[in-house]
Image (spheres, helix red, strand yellow):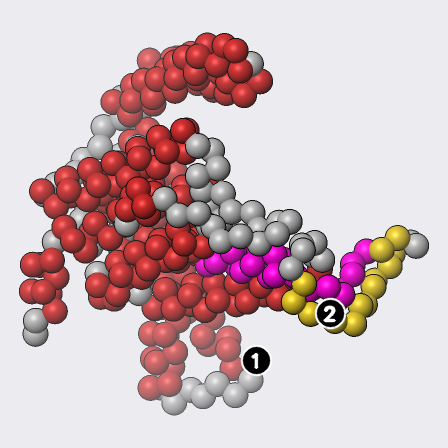
Amino acid sequence: MMYHTTTWLLWLLATLPPVMLTKNPFYLTILLLAVAVDYGTIGRSSLAASSWSVFLKTGLVLAAFSALLNPLTVHYGETILFTLPRATLKAGGAVFLELGGRITLEALSYGLTNGLSLMAILLVFATFNALVNHHKLLRSIPAFMYQTGAVTSIAIAFVPQMAASLQEIREAQMIRGHRFRGIRDLLPLFMPLLTSSLERAIQLAESMEARGFGGSISQTDRQREPIRKLSIALALLAILIGASWYGYFSASRWVGGLLAMGGVLLLGWILRAMGQQVERSRYRHELWRRQDTFVSATSLLSLAVFAFLLLLDKKALAFYPYPRFELPTFNPIIGLALLAPVAPVLGFPGRIERMRKP
């Protein structure tokens, strides 16, 4: 869309962690409204906009299912709303599932917040899918992972190409007077489809060979491959040991933090070195505008505020209604930081208005 691919990735980085870590309905509602504003203002013109409603309906179904199932199966809580007849399922003499009984406000609220969290996660990805350019997103894959990028691009284009070919073949057969009445009549449809698929595969292989796909790897790079793998393994091991140290030894957490940070820096340096050894031709570069700087800075600032407040108070995002229901707390600073997903709408309102004009 109108923003750089890196901008949308930073937007996702700032939006997804709060959604996955909080069960507070106030914060989840803010995030849901923010991504809905993004979709309603920017994402409606996207080719993938139709999938947003599918994700919304799926999220509503999951939220309703969670809100109904949790109070029927969990009978913990002090605030009893009503009592239903009890049904017990047993397996091998042990109680496997117990439905009905006491329906508590705590179980109902916990089921609602779980469903709201699932719906928020789905809508964040649906909005990101509607806003980002998938081809440019594939181009942002690091250069040394060109095999992964090629396979992913082929996989993404496979179904749309097959659907388009199937529609063209079907229209051509109908023009010739062919009518599809049963399974036997599908043979004239699938044979041309198979032939066209094989032709596309051969053309793709020829174009990849003509462009020298995979030919930039020298003998020196192959000799350095074991050293790179060993370095990556050491970096990952340092991150694992550092994270474990940080979690288990509270008196010397700084040692684990330094070790994990060193592993991350080593891994980043290795990946950067691997990317520099692979040449990539770019015929059209994405433009980085001031609006991208605004949205990226807002996303990073929101993520930093969110992480800082979470380090100060690990329960800042928590909501646990048991054993007695109490209204969840609300921190205005966190609420303001969670408005960062609206930054793409605020960053470029003039162009949005021009796009709406006929």
**Viewer-side residue, 77 vs 353:** 77
Q: Position of residue 109 (x, y in %)?
A: 56, 59
Q: Which residues are magenta?
A: 96-119
Residue with the mark numbered 2: 83
Magenta part mainly helix, strand or loop? helix
Whether residue 216 is situated above or below residue 9 in the rendered picture: above
Q: How many marks?
A: 2
Locate residue 199: give its quadrant: bottom left
* Residue drawn at point x = 31 percent, y = 65 percent: 49
| Residue 232 to residue 144: above or below | above
> Residue sitting at 32 percent across and 18 percent down?
269
Distance of mark 1 from mark 2, alpha carbons?
54 Å
Q: Residues within 10 Å of mark 2 (few under 14, many from 20)?
A: few
Assign the N terminus to one quadrant of the image: bottom left
**SS under mark 2:** strand
Q: Which residue is mark 1?
A: 183
Q: Amino acid at mark 2?
A: Thr
What residue lies at 34% left-to-right and 21% top-to-bottom?
268
Q: Are marks 1 and 2 in contact (CB under 8 Å)?
A: no
Taking the image as shown, residue 276 lies to the left or right of residue 249, namely left
Question: Residue 12: which quarter of the image?
Answer: top left
Residue type at the position of mark 1: Ile
Tell me the element at label 1: loop
Q: Earlier in the sequence, mark 1 or mark 2?
A: 2
User: Residue 224, percent across and down?
Assistant: 38, 13
Indicate left or right for 349 with 101 as reference: left
Q: Quadrant of residue 349?
A: bottom left
Q: Is residue 278 magenta?
A: no
